[in-house]
Amino acid sequence: MAETEKKGLGISVKSFIGAIVIIFALMCLTYASTFVIPGGEYTRVLDENGIETIVTDSFRTVEGGMPFYKWLLSPFLVLGADGGGAIIAVIIFLLVIGGIFTALDKCGLMKYMLEKIVHKFGKNRYTLLSLVMFFFMSMGAFIGSLEECVPLVPIVVGLSVALGWDELTGLGMSILSAGCGFAAGVCNPFTVGVAQELAGLPMFSGMWLRFVAFLIIYGIVHFFVKRHAKRIAKPIDRIEIKDDFVDDKRMDKALVLFAGILGAGILIVLSSVFFTFLQDYTMIIVALMFLVAGLVSILATGMKGIDLLKNFGSGIVTIIPAVFMILMASSIKYTLIEGKILDTLLHSAVNIAETLPKEAVILFIYLIVLVLNFFISSGSAKAFLLMPLIVPLAQIFEISSQLSVMAFAFGDGFSNVMYPTNPVLLISLGIAGISYPKWFKWTFKIQFTILIATCLLLLFGLAIGYN
């Protein structure tokens, strides 16, 4: 089996150092900008639902800047700032996943599962590739799952290597597909849902054009990933497809327990589309169900409790480097806010947009969100920050709120699987042992093609009066 499978969720030293260097450089650049960009802020008020929104035309200049010691401690101070609870939840989520996957690997269940899949689907591997990609894109597009897909990344990466491909193919099948589906946002509650609510639109209205976008994006991503897989694939006769593979009843029972419990968690997450009160707890639900599924299935394989605890602990240790990456990446937004320059950047962007022709405005809205996503990865947080500015701006140029929501979803999503400030991408690259420069080089053509396609979709929506 591949090295990726053997090491569970261990973070590659090379990819970790590379990511840390890039993020630290971005931290320094952000801090330096607080000395150059003047401070400013918008007035924010609470609406009838207790949600904080920006008051349009309320921008004023204020004293900016940030003490050096505060910047130095920002990776830790961010935990006590607004949104710190979400960061803590992500960290706990990943520590649970790291512990469970290491134990799953040590008890032999991961190896058995991959051998079973290869035995069954090895000779139809490209059909399997297409189905797996469609599954992950659907998870992103229909229920807004991105962080929740992380537990499945090492499984798909290990499966990709076992089927004669490489780690990049596995990442393309999993996290890249999930991220692109998230951006298509057919009925993504965390981007489209929140943005439509803030724009005064019915939840998930205007779905047809976003579904068209979903199909187009799937076609683009599928083309690139499958082409890469075919280019680097081992011949079918060189894949270890065991004709003498023998089912193990104990392992089969453990797999059924694991899939059944985790599947129940996914169904609960899916139901959040209808039961909106669950939307704030999807990550907690997936983490809890994954923990229960892992513990039950590992014990079912015959591993003793003491060994389970030992392996779980070692798995947590291997994921610690990811915690540092998350804290450092999150501190960039903290610096922008504490330095009072985030609102200044937003105000400047709005002023530029007001000088542009109608067709350019919708693309500029796309660009604003695309740039801001580099600093703020949370789709919901960006919606509360930007929609009060985007909707009035769009209305000035007679651009529908529905189209501005679509531009917001596009800007928020695709770059999640390109920017080095996104924790999900950092963790996934670390799991697969892929450096960020290598990932950027591999995905650049995909991202560029998607950018052109989505710009054309927005212009098409503008031309037909999409509403």
Image (spheres, rainbow, N blue to C red):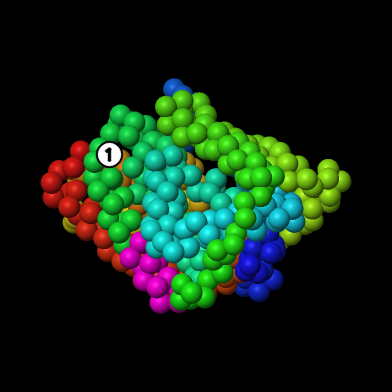
* Location of residue 252 (image quadrant): top right
Up-down relation of residue 460 to residue 21 (above or below): above
Q: As rendered, which of 438 and 202 lies closer to the eye? A: 438
Q: Position of residue 189 (x, y in %)?
A: 42, 37
Q: Is residue 117 left or right of residue 293?
A: left
Q: Residue 97 placed where, x, y %?
A: 66, 49
In the displayed structure, 3 sits above or below 266; it is below
Is 434 rendered above or below residue 116? below
Q: Is residue 382 above or below residue 289?
A: below
Under circle 1, the secondary element is helix
Q: Is residue 363 visible?
A: no
Q: Which corner quadrant holds the N terminus?
A: bottom right
Q: Residue 342: x and y, percent?
A: 49, 52
Residue nearest the viewer, comparing 362 with 135: 135
Quarter holding the C terminus? top left
Measured as percent of width and height from the top left, residue 314 is found at 79, 56
Residue drawn at 47 percent across, 58 percent down: 121
Amino acid marked by disc 1: Met
Magenta region includes residue 272: no
Report the label total. Answer: 1
- In the rendered view, does 190 fall on the left or right side of 147? left
| Magenta residues, start to end | 221-233
Q: Residue at x 25, y 37 (%)?
A: 206
